Structures are given as C-alpha cells and as structure tokens.
Amino acid sequence: MAFSTDSDLTAIIPDIFSLGIENFADEHAKAEADIIREIRRRWWPRTGYKGEMNEALLTDSQWTRTCVYLVLWKYALPQLTNWVGTGGGTDRFREMISFYRDLYAQELEAVLSDGVEYDFNEDGEWDKFENI
C-alpha cells in the first residue's frame, strides 16, 4: 500500500530533491498513517460496519493528492525551512507550508464528500460510500 511516492512530490515541486534531501520515503509512510487515522475517525463510523476498517481495502490512488499535500505540509517542507526570522523577508518554505496545509484540508474534505472507495465485500471491486 502506498498513497504517494517521491515521484508524486516531484510532479508538484520539480526541484524538491535539489535542496539537500535525497528522499522522503519515511515521510510518505507517516503521512499515510495520519490519513488512515483520519479516515478511521471521520469516515469509518459513518459506514455502519462493525469491527475494524481494513486499510488494504481502500483505493490508494484516491488518496495520492491528499497524501502528497500532507507530506509537503507536515513533513518535507519543515525540514527545508530555516525557522528563523529573515529580517523582514519571507521564507519560501514557510509560505509553502501554509499553502500545502490548506490544500491538504481542502483535498481531504473533497474526497470525503465525494465518497470514499472501499472494497466492502472484498471482491476486488471498490464501492463508493457517499454522503459523508
């Protein structure tokens, strides 16, 4: 299972790997775990199904943009900023953190509103659970 990869990051920020960090594999895994926790909290109880949600039954590609925005906001860009005042100037990465935090929230809401794809009967075909 992989909601996003480094190639998804470079599709959005082509120069991200020219900034001194070789990969964000660990950050993708952390972001995916955060999203799964959010799905469990906000979506799973509304399905009416008993027991635990099986994240392997989600459609990974439905969460790619959400995951990329979360990786950028919460994990990747904070490693690139200097977190000190810039004498009245702006820090490119701090501005990007706010931008991708907002995109993450918007994308998460959009997916939850549109309908989460989940293979409820485990037949290999995803059903869309709407109206969340």
Image (cartoon, rainbow, N blue to C red):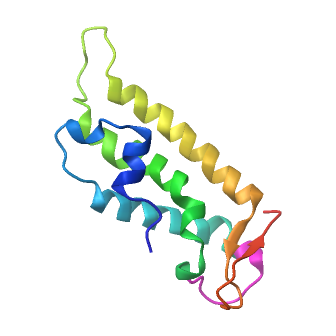
**Residue 16 on image: x %, y %:** 29, 39
Which one is nearer the viewer's eye here, 21 or 87?
21
**Residue 23 on image: x %, y %:** 24, 53
**Residue 50 on image: x %, y %:** 70, 89
Determine which quarter of the picture holds residue 42.
bottom right
Q: Which residue is at a point 25% across and 18% down the rendered structure image? A: 85
Membership of 52 in magenta stretch: yes
Which one is nearer the viewer's eye here, 44 or 128?
128
**Residue 72 on image: x %, y %:** 39, 44
Q: Which residue is at a point 62% across and 53% down the rendered structure image? A: 108
Determine which quarter of the picture holds residue 52.
bottom right
Question: Magenta part mainly helix, strand or loop?
Answer: loop
Magenta part of the protein: which range?
Answer: 45-54
25 horizontally vs 47: left or right: left
111 horizontally vs 90: left or right: right
Query: Split into 4 quadrants, where in the image is the C terminus?
Result: bottom right
Number of callouts in the render? 0
Q: Is residue 132 above or below residue 48?
A: above
Q: Which residue is at a point 24% across and 42% down the rendered structure image? A: 17
Q: Is residue 132 above or below residue 88?
A: below
Membership of 89 in magenta stretch: no
Q: Is residue 80 above or below residue 108?
A: above
Query: Split into 4 quadrants, where in the image is the N terminus?
Result: bottom left
Q: Which residue is at a point 53% across and 51% down the rendered structure image? A: 65
Determine which quarter of the picture holds residue 6.
bottom left
Outermost residue on the left side: it is: 20
Outermost residue on the right side: it is: 131
Q: Is residue 123 above or below residue 60?
A: below
90 horizontally vs 113: left or right: left
